[in-house]
Image (cartoon, helix red, strand yellow):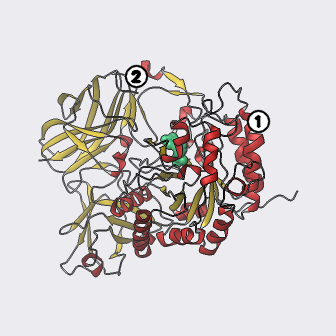
C-alpha cells in the first residue's frame, strides 16, 4: 500500500482557524429534553441516560425523525458568515445512532428514519463549497446502543461487556466509513474517554491516521494522546496555556436541542469568550443544536452573524494569532499577537489616555484596526519605579469605529513593534491601582507529607500532557495535593501544611483592600467554612472564608466564584513584596479541598 503523504504540520490550519462550529444533532433532538411528559434537567443529548430509556423505546424515535428542513448549505453558509473556519458535527454521539449512511449498523438516519437521506454527504459538499473544514465528532467510548459500548450497564443490564470487541466491531468500521466516503476530514473529535485504555487510545489514533494521515484527533481520544488538548465544556482557563488547546462551548446550556432552553448568551458575552480564549491560545468551538426538523434556532443564527460581522473587521486580531505575551489578563480587555504586532482588544474604551506597563519592545506605530486611524504613543522607562510605561493618547476626535460602535462591541488597537513583543513578566500593580495575583502564577509550597499522597491517574484524563505536572506525565498516579489544574486554578488544597505565594511589584504606597477569590467544583454550589491567612509586608490577616461578594464573569459560568474580604493594609512604600496565602482550617465537606483563582489588592 503506498505510504500516504502527511503534510508538514497538520495542526497549522487548526491553529490559524481559532474559531469553529460545533453541531450536536441526533435522535435526542426529537424528544428535545422531554420524555413521557417529564422535562429532564441538563444537556439534551443525555436524555436517554438521564431518563434510563430502554433501547427498544428509544429506537422508536427514529420513526419520527424527518428533518425535512435540514439545509446543509445554509448551515455551512452560517458557519462562514460567523467567521468559523471548521465545523464539527456529531456523526455518532453516545446514543449510538449513526447520522450517515452506515453499512455497519442499520441504526442510522438513512435506514431507520422517514428522512432516508445522508446529511453528512450534503454537509461534505456544502463545506467544500464554503471552504469550511468538515470535521466529525465520534463517541468512541460511550455507546448506549451497542451492548459492548462504554457506560451502558443501565441499557444492557447483566451483559458482560467486551469493550475491545466494540472498538473492532463498531468503532473502527464506522470510522473507516466516515474517513473514506466524505472527502478530506479535518479532525475526528473523540469524546469522554471513560473506559478506553491508553493502548486503545493510541491504537485508535493510529488507525484514523492510517486512513487520512492529516486528520487530527482531539484530546478526548483519551490519555493525552490527542493532537491537542481538550478543556472541559465551556471551560475558560485563567491564563495562557502552553501547547494547543480547544474549549467546546454552548450558546445556551445544552448541546443537543431542548425545546425549553432559551438561556442564550448575548453576542457581547460570546465575543468576550472568543477573545478571551484566543488571548490564551485556545480555540473556541461554539455549538448549535438543530431541532427535529433540521432547523437552527434563530437566536443562534442571530448571534453568530453578529460575531461574523465583528470578525469581518477585526479578524486579524484573532485568526492565526499567538497568545498574550503577558502571563496574566487585564481588566480593560485582552491581548493577542502576530509577528511584530500586538492587538489590544478593549472590551470597553478607556476614558482618557491608556497606560500599559511592562512592554519592553519599541512601538513604531499605534492605530485602530477598524479604519486605521493612528494614535499618538509615548514610551518611557521609569527608572525610579523600574517599570516600562506606554501611554496611548486618545485625542477627542474618536474615529467612526468608536462612535458607530452602538452595540459596545470590543475595539481593537494595533501596536506595530520593532520586534516580536518582549514584556516584563513580573506581576506589576496595574494603572488602575489593582494587583492581581492569579492562581496560575503562584508558587506552590507542598509539604513532604502532602507529596506522598497520590491517586490513580484518571484513566479518562482527556487533557493534554501539557497540563499534567511533569513528574506525573508518565506515571499511572498523580499527586493528590495542592496543584495548579488545567484551567490554571490552584486546587486540591487539602492540607494546612501547604501554602502558596506570589512575588509582586507595588508602584504606589498606600492603603489596599485585600480580597481572596475561592471557587466551587464544576456545577457544584460554592461552600466556605475554611479559615485562611494572608502574610505580606510583615503583617498577617486571618479570616473565615465567607462569600462577601459574588464574582461573575463568563469564566465563572459553571464554576461558582466568591470573594472574601480580608480587610485593609497600609503599604508604606512601593517596591517588591511577597504575599503568602495559608490555610489554617480546611472544611472537610468541600470536595477536593480549597480551590483558589486569585488574590487581589485594590488601592483605596
Ligand atoms: C461530553 C458529552 O458527554 C456531551 O454530551 C457533549 O457532547 C460534550 C461536548 O462532551 O461531555 C463532557 C465530556 C467531558 C467533560 C465535560 C463534558 N469534561 O471532562 O469536563
In the rendering, at what x and y percent does residue 503 appear?
30, 40
**Picture residue at 28% right of the left edge, 27% below the top:** 582
**Placement of the N terminus among the 4 image quadrants:** bottom right
Q: Is residue 459 visible?
A: yes
In the rendering, at what x and y percent does residue 455 appear?
52, 24
Which of the two residues, 129 or 274, is positioned nearer the viewer here? Answer: 129
Q: Return the mark for residue 165.
A: 1
In the rendered image of this protein, does residue 221 appear above or below residue 526?
A: below
| 3D distance between C-alphas at marks 2 and 1 | 45 Å
Which of the two residues, 271 or 512, is positioned nearer the viewer here? Answer: 271
Determine the image quadrant of residue 147: top right
Q: Residues within 10 Å of mark 2 (few under 14, many from 20)?
A: some
**Picture residue at 59% right of the left edge, 74% below the top:** 130
Disc 2 vs disc 1: which is toward the camera?
Answer: 1
Q: Secondary structure at mark 1?
A: helix
In the rendering, at what x and y percent does residue 369 appear?
37, 75
The residue labelled by disc 2 is 447
Amino acid at each position: 500500500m503506498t505510504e500516504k503523504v502527511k503534510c508538514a504540520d497538520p495542526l497549522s490550519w487548526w491553529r490559524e482557524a481559532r474559531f469553529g462550529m460545533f453541531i450536536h444533532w441526533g435522535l435526542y433532538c426529537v424528544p428535545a429534553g422531554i420524555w413521557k411528559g417529564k422535562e429532564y434537567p441538563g444537556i439534551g443529548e443525555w436524555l436517554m441516560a438521564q431518563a434510563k430509556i430502554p433501547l427498544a423505546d428509544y429506537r422508536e424515535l427514529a420513526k419520527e425523525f424527518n428533518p425535512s428542513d435540514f439545509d446543509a448549505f445554509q448551515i455551512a453558509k452560517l458557519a462562514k458568515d460567523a467567521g468559523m473556519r471548521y465545523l464539527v458535527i456529531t456523526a455518532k454521539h453516545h446514543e449510538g445512532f449513526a447520522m450517515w449512511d452506515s453499512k455497519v449498523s442499520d441504526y442510522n438516519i438513512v435506514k431507520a428514519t422517514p428522512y432516508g437521506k445522508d446529511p453528512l454527504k450534503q454537509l461534505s459538499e456544502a463545506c467544500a463549497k464554503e471552504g469550511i473544514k468538515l470535521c466529525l465528532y465520534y463517541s468512541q467510548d460511550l455507546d448506549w446502543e451497542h451492548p459492548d459500548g462504554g457506560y451502558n450497564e443501565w441499557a444492557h443490564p447483566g451483559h458482560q461487556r467486551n469493550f475491545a470487541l466494540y472498538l473492532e466491531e463498531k468503532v473502527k468500521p464506522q470510522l473507516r466509513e466516515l474517513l473514506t466516503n466524505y472527502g478530506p476530514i479535518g479532525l475526528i473529535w473523540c469524546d469522554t474517554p471513560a473506559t478506553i485504555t491508553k493502548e486503545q487510545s493510541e491504537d485508535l489514533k493510529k488507525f484514523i491516521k492510517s486512513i487520512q494521515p492529516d486528520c487530527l484527533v482531539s484530546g478526548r481520544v483519551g490519555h493525552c494522546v490527542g493532537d491537542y488538548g481538550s478543556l472541559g465544556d465551556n471551560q475558560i482557563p485563567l491564563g495562557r496555556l502552553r501547547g494547543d488547546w480547544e474549549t467546546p462551548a454552548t450558546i445556551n446550556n445544552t448541546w443537543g436541542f431542548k425545546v425549553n432552553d432559551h438561556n442564550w448568551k448575548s453576542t457581547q458575552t460570546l465575543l468576550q469568550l472568543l477573545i478571551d480564549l484566543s488571548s490564551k491560545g485556545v480555540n473556541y468551538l461554539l455549538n448549535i443544536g438543530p431541532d427535529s426538523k433540521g432547523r437552527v434556532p434563530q437566536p443562534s443564527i442571530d448571534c453568530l452573524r453578529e460575531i461574523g460581522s465583528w470578525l469581518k473587521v477585526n479578524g486579524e486580531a484573532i485568526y492565526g494569532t499567538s497568545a498574550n505575551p503577558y502571563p496574566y489578563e487585564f481588566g480593560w480587555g485582552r491581548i493577542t499577537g502576530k509577528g511584530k504586532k500586538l492587538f489590544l482588544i478593549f472590551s470597553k474604551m478607556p476614558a482618557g489616555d491608556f497606560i500599559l506597563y511592562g512592554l519592553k519592545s519599541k512601538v513604531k506605530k499605534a492605530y485602530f484596526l477598524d479604519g486605521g486611524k493612528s494614535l499618538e504613543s509615548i514610551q518611557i522607562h521609569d527608572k525610579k519605579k523600574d517599570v516600562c510605561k506606554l501611554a496611548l493618547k486618545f485625542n477627542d476626535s474618536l474615529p467612526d469605529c468608536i462612535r458607530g460602535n452602538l452595540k459596545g462591541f470590543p475595539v481593537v488597537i494595533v501596536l506595530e513593534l520593532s520586534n516580536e513583543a518582549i514584556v516584563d513578566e513580573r506581576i506589576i500593580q496595574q494603572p488602575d491601582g489593582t494587583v492581581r495575583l492569579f492562581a496560575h502564577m503562584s508558587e506552590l509550597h507542598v509539604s513532604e507529607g502532602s507529596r506522598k499522597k497520590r491517586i490513580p491517574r484518571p484513566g479518562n484524563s482527556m487533557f493534554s500532557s501539557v497540563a499534567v505536572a511533569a513528574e506525573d506525565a508518565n506515571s499511572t498516579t498523580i499527586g493528590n495535593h495542592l496543584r495548579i489544574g488545567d484551567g490554571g486554578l490552584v486546587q486540591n488544597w487539602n492540607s494546612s501544611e501547604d501554602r502558596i505565594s506570589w512575588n509582586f511589584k507595588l508602584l504606589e504606597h498606600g492603603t489596599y483592600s485585600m480580597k481572596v477569590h475561592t471557587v466551587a467544583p464544576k456545577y457544584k454550589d460554592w461552600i466556605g467554612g475554611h479559615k485562611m491567612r494572608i502574610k505580606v509586608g510583615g503583617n498577617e490577616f486571618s479570616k473565615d472564608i465567607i462569600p462577601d461578594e459574588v464574582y461573575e464573569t463568563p469564566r465563572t459560568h459553571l464554576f461558582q466564584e466568591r470573594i472574601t474580604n480580608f480587610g485593609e493594609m497600609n503599604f508604606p512604600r512601593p517596591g517588591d513584596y511577597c504575599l503568602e496565602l495559608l490555610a489554617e482550617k480546611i472544611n472537610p465537606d468541600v470536595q477536593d479541598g480549597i480551590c483558589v483563582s486569585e488574590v487581589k489588592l485594590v488601592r483605596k
